[in-house]
Every structure is written in C-alpha cells, then in structure tokens.
Amino acid sequence: MLTDYEIHPSLATHDVPAARAWYRQRLGLEPFIESPNLLAYQVGPSMFTVFETPAAGTAQNTVAVWRVPDLAAEMARLRARGLTFEDVDSGGDDGTIDGVATTAGLLDGTVRNAWFRDADGNWISMVEQPDLPGDPPGQMGIGLAIAAADLSRARR
C-alpha cells in the first residue's frame, strides 16, 4: 500500500544552476544528487527534488513544508541569509504578523506558520506544531503539500 512508503516534494524551476545557487545561498543546502535537469536534497529523514520545467513558478499554493522546532530561530537564521518571508492575509484571523500566522486549537496546541518563495516563486512553508498522532516525538522533516480545490472530492 502507498501508506507504507515515503513521499517527497518535487519543486519546479526554470533554471537548475540558478536554483542550486539560490538554495545554497538562502537556505544553506547542497544537493546530494545533481544532473543537468534535477537536484535532490537530503533534509533529515526526508528529501526533496528540484526539476527543470517551463511550468515553474505557476503554482500559487504551498508546495513544501518544513516542520521546525523553533520557528522564530529558523526565521532569524534565514533572514540573516537574505531570505524574505511573505505576508499572507487569508481574510480571517489567520493572517501573518511579522511573517508568522498563528492558529490556536489545532492539533491540541498552537500551530505557527511562515512562508517564503524560492527563486522560481514556489511557495514554501515552515511550521512549528505539536507532534502529530503516530509521529515519533519531536520528529522534524520536510513534507509535501498538495493543493485541492475541493477537499470532499480529494478525500474520495
């Protein structure tokens, strides 16, 4: 069953060498696999890939999520590298303040999110949240975010 296997985000780019430079400069990451059309990054127990396509930058939704133990510390570290966090206004109480959206009452605690865009405009998030049911305590990594216009249809 697919529930027995890992899944990883795959982000689109117009230019692999430019993406490699951006991920090195802004996030401090180096690929463990590199080809003319693909980069692969190991992040903790997870991985993500960056691949070249003319469709890069067209997704207007979050495409990957880093789960971090201290959002404020990670934001400060990345801001020092020149990363800019996005201000997001969702039209309710979940808009960002200084780049952070805080939602109380989810997952038996408070969830804090921040978003940035890579060089191709891909939306990437960092989240500080309580452990999920069934997760080993404190497990951090990168997750996949799949957008759905209709959650009922997606569940089916």
Image (spheres, rainbow, N blue to C red):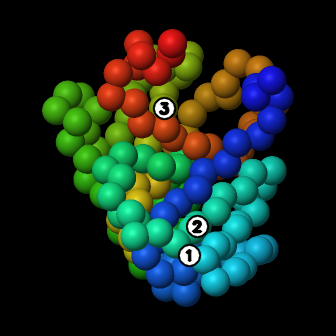
Q: Which mark is residue 111?
A: 3
The furthest residue to the front: 54
Q: CA distance from mark 2 to mark 3?
A: 27 Å
Q: Residue 13, position in %: x, y?
A: 47, 71
Residue, x 54% and y 80% (percent of image)? 16
Q: Please tell me whether residue 123 is drawn above or below residue 67 in the rendered image.
A: below
Helix, strand or loop at mark 3: strand
Whether the residues at callouts 2 and 1 have beta carbons within 8 Å, the answer is: yes
Residue type of the residue flagged with mark 1: Tyr
Q: Residue 46, position in %: x, y?
A: 75, 51
Q: Residue 64, position in %: x, y?
A: 53, 50
**Depth check: 12 or 66 in front?**
12
User: Which mark sits nearer the N-terminus, 2 or 3?
Assistant: 2
Q: Please tell me whether residue 73 is drawn above or below residue 41 in the rendered image.
A: above
Q: Residue 115, position in %: x, y?
A: 40, 53
> Residue tagged by mark 1?
23
